[in-house]
Amino acid sequence: MQNTDYFKKLQNCIICSVNNKRVVIEENGREFIIENFDCKKLEKVRVDGCLITSGIKCDYSVIVDRNSQDLNSVYLIELKGSDAKHGYKQLLQTYNFFISNFQFTSMHLRIVFTKDSKPQLKSPAEKMISKLVAEKKITFKKKSGDMTEKI
């Protein structure tokens, strides 16, 4: 079910709306690059501090080809320094926020970090993300260094 209050708030958190062939999102010395060769409409949304102002949340969202009824394809993006474990929590909490407040066709979680500490055991958030991937509810990618995504 679409939450109209959050849908209105989302409008105010859009940093840019473009159909460029290349869009770069950067923070913490990390870059998430979107190659948009079909020139789809992309909306870059500031999640942390705008759409979600309290609690754990990711940095940005990119919405692909949004219409008035739903968000279509959504990318949740976390650009981390070195604490990838906390980044999984941020993505999972933001995912839960989106499924509670918006309608969308597909969800893609992405984390870009400087260094992965490679813990022996997966964190509970990482296990839950793996479960969502297995159930085909989301896609998930992580990468040390910059990440490029073709859409």
Image (cartoon, helix red, strand yellow):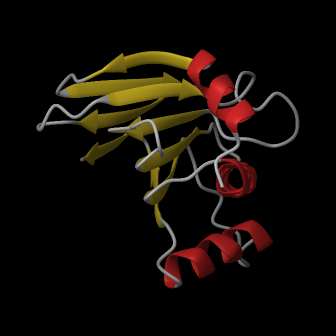
**Where is residue 119 drawn, in percent x and y?**
70, 69
**Where is residue 42 drawn, in percent x and y?**
34, 30
**Where is residue 77 drawn, in percent x and y?**
53, 42
Number of numbered markers: 0
Instruction: Look at the image and tell me whether residue 57 can be seen.
Output: yes
**Is 63 on the left or on the right of 125, as rendered?**
left
Frontmost residue, 74 versus 103: 103
Q: Residue furthest left?
A: 37
Give the residue drawn at x 39%, y 38%. 66
Q: Quadrant of the N terminus?
A: bottom right
**Is 1 on the left or on the right of 31, as rendered?**
right
**Where is residue 50 drawn, in percent x and y?**
71, 22
Above or below 33: residue 133:
below
Frontmost residue, 129 versus 74: 74
Instruction: Look at the image and tell me whether residue 29 can be seen.
Output: no
Give the residue drawn at x 53%, y 20%. 14
Above or below 102: residue 19:
above
**Is 37 on the left or on the right of 96, as rendered?**
left
Quarter location, residue 10: top right
Frontmost residue, 79 versus 37: 37
Quarter location, residue 23: top left
Give the residue drawn at x 28%, y 30%. 41
Above or below 70: residue 134:
below
